[in-house]
Amino acid sequence: MNIKKVGNVILAVRDLDKSIAFYHEFIGLPIKKQRRTWVDLGTTGGLLSLHPASLTAEHIGGSLDSGITIGFLVGDVKSALEELREKGVKVHREIVEREAGKNAVVLDPDGYLISLFEPIFRDQAQQTSGYQGFTPA
């Protein structure tokens, strides 16, 4: 086996339109390709792909201890959390400070956990530019 990289993370969602709005409009991921029952979000690296969930199978979101969590790096976790809160996004866990940085967790429309992580750069050379919330400052 010769795996090169992660191609995509696939989420089965109950309401495709609501999930597209969350990831595209709230989080800010660009739509790379959209079909009737499949949407790829992102530009380079691994994509986030959404498709309709089964109407009959049990839907299982996630838990921090034993479920799926999608992580996004942000420049300022406090402003990112405020931005999402203003848009009605449910906060699962408020900001926690750890040695590597600050982290908060929100829920997407299906209850999937979305981690917002603001790393601490010990070396100024690691940080190439400042960020405010989800977008470059």
Image (cartoon, rainbow, N blue to C red):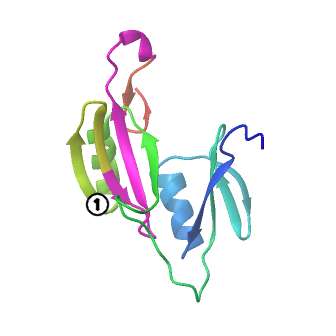
For image coordinates 31% across by 30% down, the residue present is: 100
For image coordinates 31% across by 25% down, the residue present is: 120
For image coordinates 31% across by 39% down, the residue present is: 77
Residue at the right extreme, as displayed:
1
Image x and y of residue 57, in percent: 57, 85
Q: Nearer the viewer, residue 3 or 7?
A: 3
| Mark 1 crowd level (few <14, some 14–19, many ≥20, 10 Å Cα) | some
Residue 118 belongs to magenta span? yes
- Eyeballing the image, is 13 above or below 46? below
- Eyeballing the image, is 88 above or below 134? below
Quadrant where the C terminus is found in the figure: top left
For image coordinates 39% across by 22% down, the residue present is: 130
Is 132 positioned to the left or the right of 44 in the image?
left
Q: Nearer the viewer, residue 94 or 19?
A: 94
Quadrant where the N terminus is found in the figure: top right
Q: How many marks?
A: 1
Is 31 positioned to the left or the right of 90 in the image?
right
Residue 83 belongs to magenta span? no
Q: Which residue type does callout 1 highlight? A: His
- Eyeballing the image, is 84 above or below 131? below
Give residue 103's quadrant in the image: top left
Is 67 positioned to the left or the right of 12 in the image?
left
Q: Which residues are magenta?
A: 105-128
Image x and y of residue 27, in percent: 46, 49
Residue that numbered label 1 is attached to: 92
Image x and y of residue 5, in percent: 68, 39
Residue at the bottom extreme, as displayed:
56
Q: Nearer the viewer, residue 46 or 78?
A: 46
- Eyeballing the image, is 77 above or below 125? below
In what element is the residue under mark 1?
strand
